[in-house]
Image (cartoon, rainbow, N blue to C red):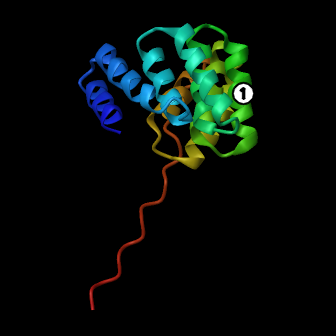
Amino acid sequence: AGHYGRAQALIALQRPEEALEAHQRGLGLDPDSAWAHLVAAALLRQAGQYDAALAAAQRAQELDDDDRPGLVEESHVLRAMSRHADAAAYARRALTLDPNHAPALVALGEALLRLEEPEAALAAFEQALREIPHLGVAQQGRAAALAALGRPVEAPAATPPPAAAPPPR
C-alpha cells in the first residue's frame, strides 16, 4: 500500500513518470489486483503511453469484468487513441451495469462529442449532472455540446439550497 500512496503523492506533485515507477513496484507485489491495474492504466494514459494503458485497463477487466471504473478508464484510453466509437461502446457497457454512473455518462458524452453527435452527448452530460450537479467535467462537456449545437451556453438549472438546520434546543 505504501507504493500506491507514494504514487498518488507523486501524481499530486505532477511527476507522472516517478508515480508510475512507484505504482509498478506495488503492482509487482500484488499482480492480481484489478484496482492496481486500473490505476496503472490511468497513470499510463496520463503519461501518453496509450498502448500500455490499454493493456493495463484490459488486464483490470480480465480480473474484474464488471468493474465500472475499469470500463470507464478503458473508454478514456480508447478516446485518447482516437478510437471514439470503441470509447462510446465501453462507456455504454459501464452504463449497463449502472445507468446512473456519472463518470460513465461523462465518458459517453465525451466520446459522442468526438463522433459529432452533440445532441446525444448533451443528453449524457445532462444526465450526469442530474446525478452529480456540481461535477465540473460534466459541466464542461455540457458547455462543449451546447457550443457544438450552436446554442448559447446557459447555466444548468440551479439546485435548491440545502434546508436550514433546525435551531439548537
Q: Residue furthest bottom?
A: 169
Residue 124 falls in which quadrant of the image? top right
Query: Quick check: can you spot residue 50?
Result: yes
Q: Residue 118 location, x and y as percent?
A: 67, 21
Residue in front for this viewpoint, 122 or 68:
68
Query: In percent of the image, x 47 and y 33: which residue is there?
Result: 30
Q: Which residue is mark 1?
A: 120
Q: Residues within 10 Å of mark 1 (few under 14, many from 20)?
A: some
Residue 47 falls in which quadrant of the image? top left
Query: In percent of the image, x 70 and y 26: which residue is there?
Result: 90
Residue in front for this viewpoint, 58 or 116:
58
Number of numbered discs on residues:
1
Q: Residue 51 location, x and y as percent?
A: 56, 8
Q: Is residue 63 left or right of residue 165?
A: right
Query: Quick check: can you spot residue 145?
Result: no
Residue in front for this viewpoint, 140 or 29:
29
Q: Residue 167 location, x and y as percent?
A: 30, 84
74 versus 6 height, above or below: above
Query: In percent of the image, x 69 and y 45: which residue is there?
Result: 98
Residue in front for this viewpoint, 54 or 76:
54
Q: Residue 40 location, x and y as percent?
A: 47, 23
- Of the 4 image quadrants, the one containing the C terminus is bottom left
